[in-house]
Amino acid sequence: MQPLALFDLDNTLVDRQSTLASWVAVFLVRHGLPGAFESWLYELLADRATPAHFAEVRDRFGIAEPVDTLWNGYCTDIASTVVCPPEVLTGLEELRTDGWRIGVATNGATDIQQAKLRATGIFDRVDAVCTSEETGSPKPDLAMFQEAVRRCGGAHDDVGMWMVGDDPVNDMAGAREAGFQTVWIDRGRSWPEELPPPDHQVRDARAAIDLLVAIGPVGKPA
């Protein structure tokens, strides 16, 4: 059985934080809104963005455009500006060449997550994508990980399953409960002392890929 590398999307394969911050600044200028609202809007969308959030934005600022228009504009804007580093795209190709199955398990609305995956080129380099909107069970729920494994052609009790992500609870704790070995993207942060540590800790997605390449297609440490 091929080993499985399951990746989170936001702030793992792509830098959602920087992309969102830039979008917020442009949105406020576009709609003639004061810069004082920048923090509020960023925090509203920091964890995830959905059409319901844009209904709240529309009501708060008295924007005339329909919610669907605001939401579709957001999806288009984010997809056109978000970037996956070239070395990460190359790394995904290396993993597949080495015999790994690759999946993406991401919390968020399907349309925006799919738009980001396709615009960055990630979609063409993975075997399956699983969004929380599709499953109705966001990470860290066990069902989310089980569905991602199924879509990648595996079973929940397969050996050689690895999860790469930046969230200590949603990605690492959830994956550990689902039987995965874990690689935490720390982005310069310290691991929360109250949680069991991940199996590995690295600075970014490329470093995580290098680790998996070194582990090899058997999916177990040498």
Image (cartoon, helix red, strand yellow):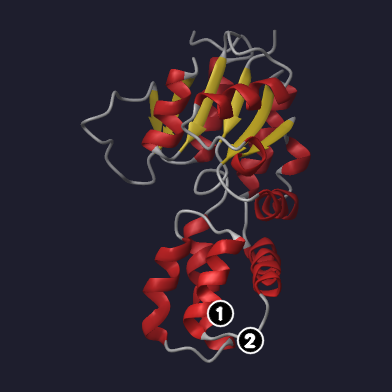
120 with respect to 207 (left or right)? right
Q: Position of residue 176 (x, y in %)?
A: 43, 20
> Residue at coordinates 37% horizontally, 73% vertically from top-left?
39
Give the position of the N terminus as an image quadrant: top right
Foreground residue, 94 or 157?
Answer: 157
| Residue 168 image-quadrant placement | top left
Q: Mark 2 and 1 residues: CB-CB less than 8 Å, in contact?
A: no
- Secondary structure at badge 2 equals loop
**Three-letter amino acid code of the residue under disc 1:** Phe
Q: Crowding at label 2, few (<14), some or many (≥20) Cα neighbours within 10 Å?
A: few
Foreground residue, 216 or 166?
Answer: 166
Q: Position of residue 58 (x, y in %)?
A: 55, 78
Q: Earlier in the sequence, mark 2 or mark 1?
A: 1
28 with respect to 202 (left or right)? right
Foreground residue, 89 or 127?
Answer: 127
Question: From the viewer's perspective, is residue 185 above or below residue 210?
Answer: below
Which mark identifies residue 64? 2
Question: From the viewer's perspective, is residue 148 above or below residue 85?
Answer: above
**Three-letter amino acid code of the residue under disc 2:** Ala
Foreground residue, 177 or 172?
Answer: 177
Q: Which residue is mark 1?
A: 27
Q: CA distance from mark 2 to mark 1?
A: 14 Å
Q: How many marks?
A: 2
103 with respect to 183 (left or right)? right
Question: From the viewer's perspective, is residue 125 above or below residue 57?
Answer: above
> Residue at coordinates 61% horizontally, 62% vertically from top-left?
51
Which mark identifies residue 94? none
Q: Nearer the viewer, mark 2 or mark 1?
A: 2
- Secondary structure at badge 1 equals helix
